Image (cartoon, helix red, strand yellow):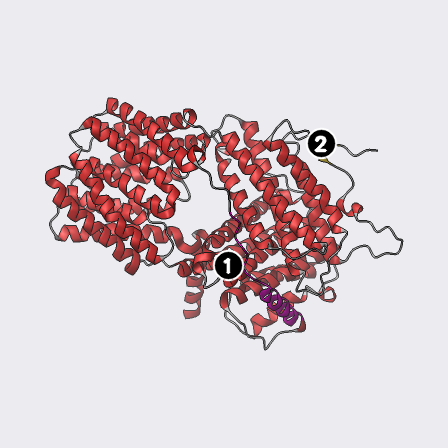
Amino acid sequence: MRAVGRQGRARLRDLAAASDPGLLRLAAGLRTVGAIALTLAVLGALGASVPHLVAGAIAAMVATFAIREKQRGRQAVTLALGLPVALTAVTLGALLRSQVVAGDLFFVALIFCAVYGRRYGDRGTALGLIGFQVYFLSLFVGATVSTLPQLYGALGVAFLSSAVVRFALVPETPAGTLERLREAFRARLAQLVAAQRELLDAAGPEEVEKALEHVRDGTARLHETALMIQGRLEDGTADDSVARLVQRRVADAEVAAERLGLSLLTARSAERADTLTLHLPGAPVPPGGPLPVRDETLDRLRRDLEALRLLVLRPAPGTAVSQVRNRLLGYRDEENLPSAPAAVQDVFRAIGEAARAVLGLRVALDGPQDESDDTPSTARSREELDAEDAAIDAAEEETEEALTGLRRPTTRAAVQVAVGSSLAIAGGELLSSQRWYWAVLTCWIVFINTASTGEILVKGYRRLVGTVLGVVAGILLAGLVGQHTWTAFAVVLVCVFAMFYTAPLSYTLMSFFVTAALGVLYTLLHTYSLSVLVLRVEETALGAACGVLAAALVLPVRTDRRTNDLLVEVLDRLADVTGTAVDQLSGGPPADLLDQARDLDRALADLRAATQPLTHPVTPLRARRDTARYVVALLETCAYHARSLAATAELLPTHQSIAADPRLRRAGRRILHNVAAITAHVADERSATAVETGPSIAALLEPGVPGTPRFGRVTDRVLRHLQRLDEGVTGLARPLKVPVERPKS
């Protein structure tokens, strides 16, 4: 029973790690709720009035979520600087309460400075956010000069409570966050292997489609976690060499898992599966059926996939585990492959490579392992990993051109928000002279983490929908809690936790919980009425409209322009990775492919986020939405093959079984030319450079002398990646309307 209990707790822990990578959402929710609860407890013990309790709760929330720095020392400094900023903001809010024009002008200036401060990094962003939100707080609770001493006390308690929770009760350290992200990567990798086993066993078309969708989701979630780990490596590891080692092992595991999924899909299909099937939601399932093998081979494959999943989850060391690991690593040797069709043998090879990636990941994350039970295959894999580790060194960072003036995003956004807020103040006061600030708040919020008019429009729409639904919930909650102060605060705490836990998942849900909590707070302040909540919806709609109008008319960044700029960036990074990898595989000097692949992933993530307005379900331009999805899926496919080429190229200096092939350089020329042609057309539609087509990549490398060996197994794998990359790049020409030059007959 005790063992069953431990297994159950382990499964729950793995499920939590996979659903919330690094437990970042859980920690953010607990930290914020803890700060608010501690503030309320202290202020309640001191006999504070309800308005000051509300002020303290809001200040504690702001002081907690505004700080995004990763180092504890920098967090402490920013929190200490935030208190005088908050005291100044609430003082000015009280002093300017009766000076309407002066107060409005100061509010607009404060908004401009708060947004402009983002150019100074996390600290500038945090202090600007604290200044804006605390000034808003003074308007919400009706701060006056006579109440300033009590408000100062509430703010002091709030910031002190935030510090206690952040540094003592729910501490956050870069190393701890990175460790939890590593566990999340393991859990998501195990989930992906389980989905691949489900694909193996799927029978009918509906089962295959469902299993394939699970594989797609698992692949995307694994990549998401890999990007999160990359963003935390620099601060969460002891030195650059350790960070690069973990980065390499995470990249190896991701590529190996994706290769295993593609091998399974190919083995089930009548022909080699298109990698696009793994990245494009709704892509047709390749024709085919169950694997054409004997039952014992299928059972063996099923057992090996389950064994791989258990290895990923890091079971306790032991002889049985070592035997399973040795068996899976043995598939890297041809003589250990079962008698089966070539496509099925590729699946077993992919399992062997995945087991090697898991071994490397475990060594990188957990240190040296027991080698007493190693077979020759396992020992060779360890030697390869050790040789790779020894070759890792730090790379120089590239500097980027600094934008100035109105070209700088923070300056442009500050001007836009200032204009939009001015409109929101004017319109909001026409709706209500008492609660016009809700329109300003919405205008401010829709500009956070957005960079184009389309993104602002989508965010405003989501906020409005969440607000409307939250009003309904607020009416129900206000009726339930009545004037029971502490019951109401308990409901607010639940809403705040839900708000922070769901924020990364759904902005609509976050807005819903915010509005529901506000309905309860209005009850506490004795200002609740149905008309107030309806006014909240009207002010929200007005603020969103003002934000969209300012973004569209003042220094606009059109969604098309932004996506084109990001698309050019992705294509440039794709060309860098492909060109460097092919050059290294052809015998060129070693280069830093890890950082280049990471830059490609980041650029692609930025593009994916920027296309959300084009792919949103409410967009009326269905053809444009489908095109955007197709282009992003093609680019993800190209990125996978580029990462695979980079991973293989990185093995060259340390693996005797992998040799450079100068013929590969010729195969990469057409791909690089086509990427350059597409980049030129996206940057300038008048470009006349055409995409070239022709024989397959392998045909370009056919030996000219009879009897010359064709290719080795590694070169064949490289050629498959180059061929798929060539097809993916050429496939971009049609949706992007790039001219295609047909081969001459």
Helix, strand or loop for disc 1: helix
**Relative depth, front residue between 332 and 556:** 556
Which quadrant is the C terminus positioned in? top right
- Residue 314's tag is none
Percent from the top left, x then y, of residue 371?
58, 75
Q: Amino acid at mark 1?
A: Arg
Q: Is residue 318 visible?
A: yes
Q: Magenta stretch: give its range.
A: 377-399
Q: Residue at x 22, y 47 (%)?
A: 84
Above or below: residue 280 compared with residue 540:
below
Whether the magenta-drawn stretch holds residue 391 is answered as: yes
Whether the magenta-drawn stretch holds residue 609 is answered as: no
Q: Residue at x 66, y 33 (%)?
A: 733
Q: Residue at x 25, y 38 (%)?
A: 518
Locate residue 690: give its quadrant.
top right
Helix, strand or loop for disc 2: strand
Please report whichever mark, 1 or 2, sits nearer to the chain's N-terminal start: 1
Q: Which residue is mark 2?
A: 740
**Relative depth, front residue between 206 and 444:** 444
Marks 1 and 2 sit apart, C-alpha to C-alpha, by 43 Å
Q: Which residue is mark 1?
A: 186
Q: Is residue 537 visible?
A: no
In the picture provided, is 541 more to the left or to the right than 555? left
Percent from the top left, x then y, of residue 176?
40, 61
Q: Residues within 10 Å of mark 2 (few under 14, many from 20)?
A: some
